[in-house]
Image: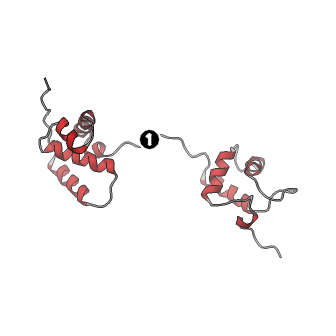
Amino acid sequence: MARPARPFQLRPGDRKSLQALLKGGVQQVRVVLRALTLLQLDAGLSAPKVSAVIGFAAPAIRVVAQRYRDHGLERALYERPRKGHSELLELSEKQRIIAMVCSTPPEGRARWTVRLVAQEAVKRKLVPRVGRETIRVLLESHDLKPWREKNVVRGRTR
């Protein structure tokens, strides 16, 4: 025997906000589906019926409804930011490394390599420590390839 549907009702201001969100510009798919879920629940449909229409599992629909009841519209529509890891290099450290790579390589070297950049950054005390992968990603994000002399910007010598 199925349990009775828990009554769900949106606040009038929230209903208008959801309709404006759906009529507005580009939104994340998850946000749109959650907004549609809330509107369907407000229309009186049960979680399994909304599940058939929206494509979410019934427990997920109940979670969205419970988040709305407990924390409001923002929390029901949007996820909390995830922790993730912090940036390995600060902006100033990145800039110093890029400047170093754009200069001439150390004495006895024809060009910079990723390993050499990592070693020199630590040696010159630009950063306390840094790995090759971090340097590789940094150079790639700035579209620098110091091992190819043509792609490095260097000041003109007279």
Q: Where is residue 117 in the image (x, y as percent from the top left)?
A: 74, 52
Question: Which image quarter is the N terminus in?
Answer: top left
Furthest-top residue in view?
Answer: 1
Q: Mark 1 points at which residue?
A: 82
Judge the density around disc 1: few (<14), some (14-19), many (≥20) Cα neighbours within 10 Å.
Answer: few
Residue 137 in percent (x, y) is at: 62, 51
Q: What is the x, y in percent for residue 14?
A: 20, 49
**What number of labels is visible?**
1
Residue that appears at 69% across and 55% down? 97
The residue depicted at 28 percent of the width and 42 percent of the height is 76
Q: In which quarter of the image is the C terminus?
A: bottom right
Q: Residue placed farthest to the right in the image? A: 108
Q: Which of 15 and 29 is in front in this view?
A: 29
Q: The residue tagged with tag 1: helix, strand or loop?
A: loop
Q: Is residue 148 depicted above or below 70 in this figure?
A: below
**Front-most of 88 and 117?**
117
Occupied quadrant, residue 98 = bottom right
Q: Position of residue 148 (x, y in %)?
A: 74, 61
